[in-house]
Image (spheres, rainbow, N blue to C red):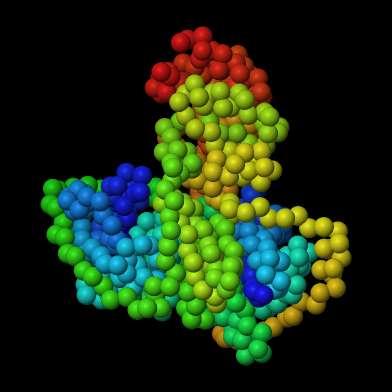
Amino acid sequence: MCEIDPATGAVDEVSLEALALARSLSEVGGGVSVRAVMVGEVPDREAAAATLGRHGAAEVHHAVGDAVSAFGGAAWAAAVESVLQTTGSVAFLCGGTPRGMEVTAHLAARLGVPMAANVVSFDGLSPLTVRRQVAGGAALEEMRLTARPALFTVAGHAWQPAASGTETAAWVETTPEVPEADLVARVVRSADPVPDESSSLTSATVVVGAGRGVGGPDGFGPVTELAELLGGAVGVTRVVTSLGWRPHHEQVGQTGSRISPDLYVACGISGAIQHWAGCASSKTILAVNTDPEAPMMTRATYAVVGDMHEVVPALTEEIRRRR
Amino acid sequence: MTRVLVAVKRVVDSSGEVGLTEDRQGLDGRYAGYTIGDHDACAVELGIRIAEATGGSATIVSVGAAEAVEQIRAALALGAHAGVLVETDPTALGPADVAAEIAAVVSDAEAAGEPFDLVLLGNDAADTGDFQVPVRLAYAVGRPIVTGAGRAEVTDGVLVATVTGPHGEETYEVPLPAVASVLEGGTEPRYPTLKGRMAAKKIEVEVLTPTGAATGGGRVGWQLPPEAPSTTEVIGEGPETAPAVADLLQRLGVLR
């Protein structure tokens, strides 16, 4: 299943990553066809067909109609189920987004088959063995999916989208029958992101992060100043939000946002797995910490050993000086 | 008067360094300690609030080892009224098995004339992260489900749940009986009071045996990703590094 990124109106990056994994599976499996299914509104079908075609989907099955115009896990799963049946698919995958997870879980329950969440790789087809993230990304589970269709979601940033060729995917529209019972739990009202406060964090090219080391709710001045100077967003650890020092939408980590900026500056952050899960996809990480052995310091691209209360203001001053 | 059932899972605290058990079936909790995940904690909080607001009750259920009574009692100390443990080896269970056991608790309550109007669970377990127990449970008990709710209230027998995410703030209105999975962030869990802890000690946690044989989840084993040797470039020490760091920022193209 491929989704539209609500922020851009284009096919979501994570869907393209899942499509790349699907193509790999298909290649190893002897060239089984790869199709995409989309449900509900697609703002620009032509663009979607071109993008999905380039990324390896032969066809796009687009489920439309009143039953699926609003999001509802059961209704969307019913729609996907009918496409799985018409196409005789042996595997279904999608990006590990909240909707992707939910629809896949519904399919698993409806079809009475297992589901693997957050798959990062596969290892052999007989039996189909996948590796998936567990413990917030701290460990990997090897899991066998022997039932068909094989159902799984793909962890974000685990696969690279792979565009090749210029074929546009054929567009097949369907209006699936959805049982009444599946229409009960659906979105009845939605308020626009305005913009969504955490989406500025997840789309920022620079993020300046801070943890408990800041010392208290009034200690974020230097951090927000540096973020502003670099045109970036502020991110914080879970401890900071559970202490009430900063709002939840600034949280980076397993229970917060996953960021992938060009630069992540981690100030006074030890780098617990919970937080690392959220920032590991950053292109470059600069860590500032008094402890040179802290996990964030040994995993970062660059490190400064020192007290963030001294280093960050000095850095800010230097940046201003150079303007 | 809403009767709420809240499911919690005893998990190894993975906020620090993690290690695996010898049989590689899960995390080793001997040094890290145990807790319930943040999503579960918010489910407990919402369950207690709904019980308080509607003059109903909140029952805590956990499917797991005998020690999970500890986590049930911690939730009782926050204001939940009753606790049920389905005692079993958690590593032998897959998500479908867990859902089946919780479904059995729901069916038993219905048969006893004291049905649960609402079942709340954390969106995903902090250790196994299967993202499917709540949905499987919903199908097992034949109820509609909302997943990823940050906030949930019951008004006139209708569950009003809000899901906040990339698509904005989405509201669901589902007539009870229903199931909802909860995502941390929309509500602040309360802290236990001494009075609550004392009262919790007196509540007897019902211990049940599983109704079915575990089918497992297809798990072969867990592994820790190989720790790559550190390639970190240490720029220097202290605020004197500011010019060198500014040079780096310039090279990275983030200085305008």
Q: Is residue B225 above or below residue B50?
A: above
Q: Residue at x 58, y 53 (%)?
A: B186
On screen, residue A124 versus residue B108, left or right, reads left
Q: Quadrant of the N terminus of chain A?
A: bottom left
Residue B222 in the image: x percent, y percent?
A: 53, 61
**Residue A179 lies in quadrant:** bottom left
**Residue B5 lies in quadrant:** bottom right
Q: Nearer the viewer, residue A56 or A236?
A: A236
Specify whether residue A203 is in view. yes
Q: How many marks?
A: 0
Q: Residue at x 72, y 55 (%)?
A: B190
Q: Nearer the viewer, residue A142 or A43?
A: A43
Specify whether residue A289 is in view. no
Q: Residue at x 41, y 18 (%)?
A: B256
Residue B37 in the image: x percent, y percent?
A: 63, 58
On screen, residue A116 versus residue B10, left or right, reads left
Q: Is residue B26 above or below residue A176?
A: above
Q: Residue at x 59, y 67 (%)?
A: B154
Q: Nearer the viewer, residue A257 or A269?
A: A257
Q: Residue furthest front?
A: B156
Residue A211 in the image: x percent, y percent?
A: 63, 36
Residue A117 in the image: x percent, y percent?
A: 44, 62
On screen, residue A67 versus residue B146, left or right, reads left
On screen, residue B200 versus residue B241, left or right, reads right
Q: Is residue B254 above or below residue B115?
A: above
